[in-house]
Amino acid sequence: MKTFLLALLLGWAGQAKAQFTDSLRVSVGTTATVASQGYQPLWVVANRYGTLTDQRADLATHVRFSNEHVFTHATAVSTAPLAAPRRGFYLQYGADVYNNNHFNSLFLAEGYVKVGYKNLQLRGGRYREFTGELDPTLSSGSFGISGNALPMPKIDLAVVDYTPVPFTKGFVQFKGQFAHGWFTEANGIKGAYLHQKSLYLKFGREHLSVYGGLTHFAQWGGTFPSGKAPSRFKDFLRIVAGASGNNDDPVYHQGPVDIDNAVGNHLLIPDFGVILRGDHATLRLYTQTIFDKGVADTANLNQRDKLDGLKILSRDRLVGLSWEQPSGSFLQKIVLEGIYTKYQGGPVQYQGRDNYYNNGTYSMGWQYQNQILGTPLFINRERASHYQLDQNNLSGWSIVSNRVVGVHVGVKGALSPKIEFRALATYVQHYGNYYDDAAFTPTKR
């Protein structure tokens, strides 16, 4: 902690923007990072979509452009006072090219095409995403996708904003998505896929509303040193349903398949919240929990990790409260969050030890290019090398600490119309995981 408090950080960002049409935007920027240790403080690099390196000093320069073509006039989809008009048919595309790692790495941070009609959108490529109803700039991060890692390539059909359900007069609204993505090679696993889908419902009017939703992720397919995982269309249907393997199918008796468990590596994230809008401020209370493996029967090892129940009332969760007022104010938004993931069903094998983000088959865990896709408050092996941990006491899991207890505060506002500020402060106690607890005894803070 003293090291972080003494860390010296020098950063500047130069933005040159030009508008050649009503929608074309081009920007060029450079961010410099300097620290007193050989790595950066957490919030300098976390939730930055993999664009900054975790080194003592580096420059990250990027060139970004985006454009939009609207083919029909905008129409209002709601008569509510704050409802924004939605476009008719439109086309969006853009790219963001970065150079960092002492000028040795050149990569595409974003490159996408989006076609939409009102709230319905078909999108493909590499694009920034933050799942769940959390503030993407002030929250500690979603359990699903927090913007911590470089976006992976996807094809996605989505209802991007809450849309009224017919015949409910706007009292019931929904949004959701169905996506397919591609992981890069990791831990000797090539060609693994991502399945992602979500559905959210919101009930209420402008001043008071409640919402609930569920996002389902799955890693599946791919070629392993031991063979090829099932990757046919009928295997994909099992992934969508979270079903176990087919014991009568010869394909499920080759390669890295555990027939007793659900095929692939599944992660489900339930979200719930209440929104209260006043005349001058908005208050949100929200919670998000995590479901990484099922309930088991220790007397029958053929019934391990059954997808029974979503553990909605689990003690492991993120709880948050946010307060927001109009953007012209000095203090615009405050977010308070608490995170607890220490329990994980308890220490009994199969009954508990959920071991969030780790998986026995997909050994890279819930990561993309060695960066955690979800909350950056967990520690992977790469970042653990910074923290003077005894490497001999670490097991082979990719996420070495996923049992945490912490509090987080985020604040943003404006000193003037052109000068904005953001502050993040987090205190976390790390207990490792149920296999790495020796390296985290006593508790690391």
Image (spheres, helix red, strand yellow):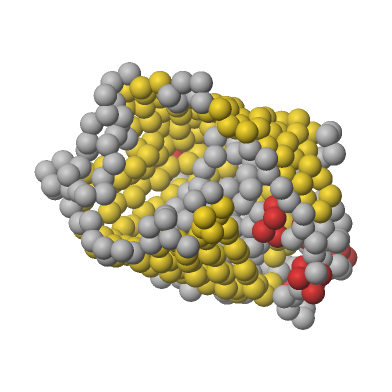
Q: Residue at x 54, y 39 (%)?
A: 128
**8 and 162: which is toward the camera:** 8
Q: What is the quadrant of the N terminus in the image?
A: bottom right
- Spot the residue most to the top: 71
- Spot the residue most to the front: 416
**351 and 187: which is toward the camera:** 187
Height in image: 304 above or below 225?
Answer: below
Q: Residue at x 60, y 39 (%)?
A: 151
On screen, residue 57 versus residue 123, left or right, reads: right
Q: Provide residue 391's location: percent of width, then percent of height.
A: 86, 63
Height in image: 174 above or below 299?
Answer: above
Q: Is residue 330 visible?
A: yes
**305 and 97: which is toward the camera:** 97
Q: Quadrant of residue 292?
A: bottom right
Q: What is the quadrant of the C terminus in the image?
A: bottom right
Q: Is residue 295 visible?
A: no
Q: Quadrant of residue 152?
A: top right
On screen, residue 186 versus residue 167, left or right, reads: right
On screen, residue 344 versus residue 241, left or right, reads: right
Q: Provide residue 269's location: percent of width, then percent of height.
A: 46, 56
Q: Residue at x 49, y 51 (%)?
A: 417
Q: Residue at x 81, y 53 (%)?
A: 34
Query: Tag count in the figure?
Result: 0
Q: Provide residue 64's location: percent of width, then percent of height.
A: 61, 30
Q: Provide residue 366's location: percent of width, then percent of height.
A: 62, 50
Height in image: 376 above or below 3?
Answer: above
On screen, residue 274 versus residue 226, left or right, reads: left
**367 and 437: which is toward the camera:** 367
